[in-house]
Image (tube, rainbow, N blue to C red):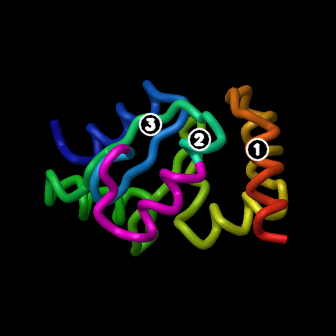
């Protein structure tokens, strides 16, 4: 199976996928750690894909999304963005709206706490 096929299958089978450096329990870069931390804190169930474990997936996800950096967040098959975009969306409430619109469960109080802490 090609890297593109693996990526497509992963984002199709899982509601939320984070392509990241490391794992959600052991991130290996600050940007990946930030996005995984937001998702974990908000109680979002997500599939993590460690791009450091597979060079073909690491390059393949960049080609697939036409986005040059890692991490990359997908919700219901839709590319959301990287660390800066996810951070901005979290602080503005747009991430809450996206998750609600896509039917993805999350802890609204935790999302509000993130915004309060960063106000």
* Disc 1 + disc 3, Cβ < 8 Å: no
Q: CA distance from mark 1 to mark 3?
A: 16 Å
Instruction: Look at the image and give the residue range highlighted in magenta.
Output: 25-38
Q: Residues within 10 Å of mark 1 (few under 14, many from 20)?
A: some
SS for tag 1? helix
- Mark closest to the chain's N terminus, 2 or 3: 3
User: Is residue 105 located in the magenta-colored stretch of the structure?
Assistant: no
Q: CA distance from mark 2 to mark 3?
A: 8 Å
Counting from the top left corner in percent of width and height, residue 45 is at: 53, 30
Q: Which residue is mark 1?
A: 98
Counting from the top left corner in percent of width and height, residue 59 is at: 24, 64
Q: Which residue is mark 2?
A: 75
SS for tag 3? helix
* Disc 1 + disc 2, Cβ < 8 Å: yes
Q: Which residue is mark 3?
A: 11
SS for tag 2? strand
């Amino acid at each position: 199976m090609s890297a593109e096929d693996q990526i497509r299958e992963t984002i199709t089978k899982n509601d939320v996928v984070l392509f990241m450096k490391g794992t959600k329990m052991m991130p290996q870069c600050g940007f990946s750690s930030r996005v995984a931390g937001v998702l974990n804190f908000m109680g979002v169930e997500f599939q993590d894909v460690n791009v450091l474990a597979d060079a073909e997936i690491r390059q393949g996800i960049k080609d697939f999304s036409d986005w040059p950096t890692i991490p990359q967040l997908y919700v219901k098959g839709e590319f959301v963005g990287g660390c800066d975009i996810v951070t901005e969306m979290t602080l503005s409430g747009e991430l809450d709206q996206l998750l609600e619109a896509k039917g993805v469960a999350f802890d609204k109080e935790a999302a509000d706490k993130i915004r309060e802490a960063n106000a």
